Image (tube, grey):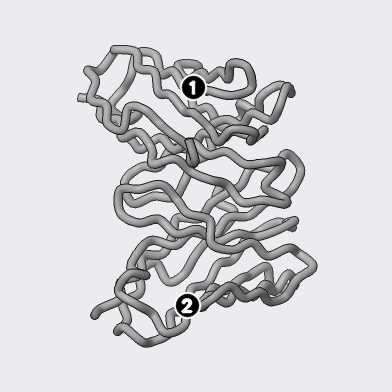
Amino acid sequence: GAGVSQSPSNKVTEKGKDVELRCDPISGHTALYWYRQSLGQGLEFLIYFQGNSAPDKSGLPSDRFSAERTGGSVSTLTIQRTQQEDSAVYLCASSFGTAFTYGYTFGSGTRLTVV
Amino acid sequence: SQQGEEDPQALSIQEGENATMNCSYKTSINNLQWYRQNSGRGLVHLILIRSNEREKHSGRLRVTLDTSKKSSSLLITASRAADTASYFCATDRGANSKLTFGKGITLSVRP
């Protein structure tokens, strides 16, 4: 597709359950980023994939969070044993090269609600 | 940690007026970018200004960068109701190329 695609767009889950969020970046974009945005807040960096390099996981808030990117394309963010504080909009972005030269293209996000 | 801090937090203007939004940051950068977010949607990249540039234009947008003051401003001229959105500045320090975003400015343009 022409843009960054995220699924599902909305997810309601019970506390303690695991969830998987999917991101399909723009074809040919080598860099992929995950951020989360809590209500009325800015974007909090989670993880960054660049080509075949080891991902930058420095933003993951706990070991309940993990992400992978298969074949340099689709990425899945997994949250295990969800907590209410995990409720947020999870945004994925991709870029061709690095942000030094190009801006990010964002998906519309997945709104996660933990009840 | 928050690198970019925008101000004001909220701005309400009349259609046709100019809107000025400011961003300050703490550490040296390679570039600074501005994004717009309409309610319930992802962010849209507006403009990128490099650390060796002082001013850049794109349509009704004008961005300035003062690296000595570690600040940037985004000016939207002749605002329209459709400009109503949240605006974020983001800084790129270049080391590992992830952007650090501020908390955003909510702009309301009254028709």
Q: Residue furthest right?
A: B52
> Which residue is at a point 48% across and 73% down the rendered structure image?
B21
Q: Residue furthest front?
A: A1
- Amino acid beneath label 2: Ile
> Which residue is at a point 38% across and 41% down the rendered structure image?
A108
Towards the viewer: A14 or B81? B81
Towards the viewer: B47 or B12? B47
The subunit letter for the residue under badge 1 reads A
Towards the viewer: B28 or A24? A24
Left or right: A43, with B92 as reference point: left
Does B55 appear above or below B94? Answer: below
SS at mark 1 in the image: loop
Towards the viewer: A6 or A110? A6
**Numbered disc in front, either 1 or 2:** 2
Q: Position of residue A12 (x, y in %)?
A: 23, 25
Left or right: A94, with A64 as reference point: right
For disc 2, the marked residue is B76
Does B36 appear above or below A33? Answer: below
Does B102 appear above or below A114? Answer: below
SS at mark 2 in the image: strand
Left or right: A23, with B92 as reference point: left
Q: Position of residue B107 (x, y in %)?
A: 35, 69
For disc 1, the marked residue is A62
- Amino acid beneath label 1: Ser
